[in-house]
Image (tube, helix red, strand yellow):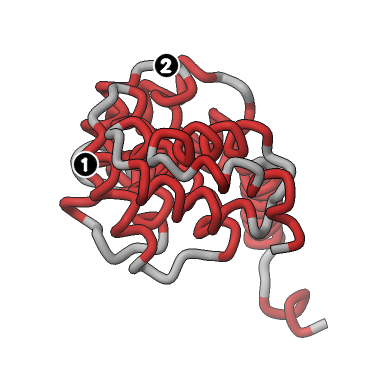
Amino acid sequence: SFLKRVVSPAGAVALAVVAALFSMGVVARNREYASPLLLARTIVERHPTSVAHHVLGVELLNAGDRDAAMSELRQAIPGAPRAHFTLGVELVKEGRTSEAIDQFQAFLRKQPELIEAISARQLLGRALAQQQRWAEAIEQEQRVLTMNPSPAQRLDTHALLAEAFFGAENFQEAIAHCLAYLRVRPNDDRVLTRLGIALVATGRLESVQVPLRIGIA
């Protein structure tokens, strides 16, 4: 062949070595790409940016290594704003509500227009409600309704607003959101009970039976 004619024996050996090294490199790279976690680790080792730490944190969560994941997520802050959201979600799961609130608020300050902002506000409202900060919770959940949430998100937000208005003893608003929720999920005992109490609290005794026939209203 042409290569045999122009390459000396020594050159042929050199070409063989290069080819072998190239092949080894390809195999190693394929191994890196075969695992999202391994690839994320490799990226952090070679280019330790905030975004890379966030990606690695997410992959560690997927792999079940929670402690390492939380460390990576904290290293991703403040350079990767989405890490605030991811960290907030995990802090909620741990019951660390105050810290979660801080992370959601930081995310929303930096990226209020991202698609995750809808979930962030919803989760922030839920966390504020857990601390009985009703007015703040109501503000967040009302903003969710203006952000074009999905049908499921809208429904959950009505339930959260019903809870927050009920906690704030604004029973008229609580009733409105209970009804909006129960039109879709008429058998939710928790919301049915809240609606019944709110109806009694507003003196609408004749309407107490509404929860029993909400599904056909």
Which mark is on residue 65? Answer: none
Q: Nearer the viewer, residue 62 or 177?
A: 177
Determine the image quadrant of residue 170. top left
Q: Which part of the image, by quadrant, shows the N terminus? A: bottom right
Q: Earlier in the sequence, mark 1 or mark 2?
A: 2
Residue in the picture at 21% in, 40% down: 136
The residue pinned by badge 2 equals 95
The secondary element bearing badge 2 is classed as loop
Which mark is on residue 105? Answer: 1
Q: Is residue 43 visible?
A: no
Residue in the picture at 16% in, 51% down: 109
Q: Are marks 1 and 2 in contact (CB under 8 Å)?
A: no
Q: Position of residue 31 (x, y in %)?
A: 69, 42
Q: Position of residue 169 (x, y in %)?
A: 30, 34
Q: Is residue 25 left or right of residue 137?
A: right
Determine the image quadrant of residue 14. bottom right
Q: Is residue 197 left or right of residue 216?
A: left
The secondary element bearing badge 1 is classed as helix
Q: Nearer the viewer, residue 93 or 169?
A: 169
Residue in the picture at 45% in, 55% down: 176
User: The disc labelled 1 sits on which kind of residue?
Assistant: Gln
- Image vertical order of residue 165 relative to residue 10, above or below: above
Q: Position of residue 52 (x, y in %)?
A: 38, 44
